Amino acid sequence: MTAYDDFRFASTGDLADFGGPASRFNHNITAIKLLKSLEAEGRAHGALAPDEQRTLARYSGWGDGEVLNRLFPYGAYSQAPIHPELDRLLTVEERGKIAGSALNAHYTALPIIGAIYEALNYLGIGALDSIRALEPAAGIGHFFGAMPVEIAAKAERVAVELDSITARILQYLYPNAKVFNQGFEESSLPNDFFDLAVGNVPFGNVPIHDPRIKERYLKAAIHDYFFVRSLKLVKPGGIIAFITSRYTLDKVDSRVRRHIAERADLLAAARLPESAFRKNAGTEVVADVLILRKKFKSGGVDEKTGWLETEVFPNEMDYQVPINRFYIERPDPMLGIPGCSRGMYCDCEFTLKPDGGHLASVLRDSLISQLPYQAVTAAVSQPEMSAPALTPSLIEDAHEKEKANAVNLDSLSGTSRQRASLLLDIYAAAKQVIRLQLLDAGDEKLTTAQQELNDIYFRFTTRYGRINSKQNLKDLDRRSPIVPFLKALEEPAGKGAWKRAAIFHSRTIRPHKNFTHISSPKDALFFCLNECGRVDLDRIAALTGQTRGEAANALRGLIFETPSGVWVTADEYLSGNVVAKLEEAQAKKLGEFFGISPAVFI
């Protein structure tokens, strides 16, 4: 398979002039037409000519109201006729995704991205030996395309993007990145995994449904949710560098900030003037650049921390305009002229007008002046952080052939695909728990891996119910060893209910030298399924110190012997043509009784 290089901007000035609404609209139309053409001819991701790359890289989404109005010239985005240029190109689903994500599709100017990366390099990101980087609201990947060489060359890059058109353009431009075309709240990403989360997150008081986060106030606004979720995903000592709504800091309710402060230190903050996104996205909004470092241990908050609370911003009209205390005490990081004026939703709203300076260089200098030099290098390379538990949705492991044989995800869509994908994640997470036990790993590593397994299992069960529920395994190949392995992760709890097996919370394998003994026959069966993908009664007997007969008797109801003498799991034995299997079993018994061939009775 040919390896292609990811797209890179020649400089932070590349593609800087997107033009007005008409130009941006035309760039978008041209990019979508090219995307459809590439897909129709089956062009490989990354196999683009330079002019094709530039065409796709000029796609800027529909966040500009004037551009969106051109796309839906008759209003009512979800129902009205679309512009005739795209009417024949877009599917109903693509149109819905565009309408649903348009208001947050604000692309970041490359000079601003460049300034953020200069600050991150000062902090030490570029000095790491390897980098796992996440962009959770990626757009078409400008933060990837402008990533400095010293970071990009060592980075395993993961992107999440809700809009289908945008995600597909992103994958063509960055074939070596892992791209998840879904909402951030739907993604199954590993906790404590990434060195860096970077990007421009969606803004707005849009609540997010994520059952993994119980507190509603943490997901009541989409921009706050991105911080809360990303804090779970970056490893201790890792960095979050987001452009976010000013209300992450300026909201009077400080609970979200306290939640963040318990888990991370704010290293730097800078407020962008409302013109920062005008050229790229055609929008005016005051936003903040925040750089945080995740703590190695969550704990209390120093009440003297200057960014927890808000104060009233002084204004001539004596309106109660809240602004974060950080900017009251240190106005220099406000990169413009602060003031108040009538807003869309209130009589007096905070504003930050441009002061005529070169925004990118001012932003860089402001961030660097607040950051500790090369502080990341020592933090994330501490020995105890060198081996985080790896979640299979991102990491290739030795069992990918088993997973491919179990189900072809490309043949599925919608709920079936999401359900099967999560089952494979559960499978590989459980494999990791077993693997660590076989290696006699310490309690801390094992507990972390078990927590990952529990997290994925919880995401699955909240959506689809228990693994052993009737419909949940129907998309997997019943002949695959993955199926009995997954079913064994749950135990009957009476009256058709199921509960998690001990592997979720306890050491089920206590290996002796060369892993020669397992006390429980059921755990030995579990180990055997993991080791060779089938029931090996001799191996189980050897592990438990029992005879074959004793082991078979101990596993009665969990395994069955076929007429040909092969032992299989109950699930495999009781699936398929059960009537034919019953006739074979009866024929075998009759044959044994009369001392003649069973074929006579079939």
Image: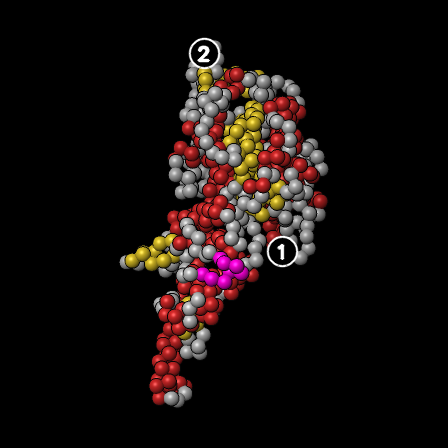
Q: Amino acid at mark 1?
A: Gly
Can you say whether 7 is above or below 255 in the image?
A: below
Q: Dot 2 lies on which element?
A: loop
Q: CA distance from mark 1 to mark 2?
A: 61 Å
Relative side of 425 to 268, left or right: left
Instruction: Tell me residue 258's x, y (percent).
Output: 44, 28
Q: Which mark is residue 42?
A: 1
Residue receiving disc 2: 317
Q: Amino acid at mark 2?
A: Met
Q: Dot 1 lies on which element?
A: loop
Using the rendered image of the protein, determine whether residue 432 is visible from the camera's viewpoint: no
Residue plotted at (36% across, 82% down) = 589
Using the rendered image of the protein, determine whether residue 322 is visible from the camera's viewpoint: yes
Residue plotted at (38% across, 53% down) = 500
Q: Could you say which quadrant of the image residue 599 lies in?
A: bottom left
Specify start and end residues of the magenta stretch as a single range.
511-518
Relative side of 235 to 30, left or right: left
In the image, residue 145 lies in the stretch drawn in magenta: no
Q: Residue furthest left?
A: 495
Residue plotted at (49% across, 65% down) = 533
Instruction: Tell me residue 600's x, y (percent).
Output: 39, 88
By secondary structure, the bulk of the magenta-drawn segment is best described as loop
Residue plotted at (42% across, 68% down) = 546
Q: Could you say which quadrant of the image residue 331 lies in?
A: top right
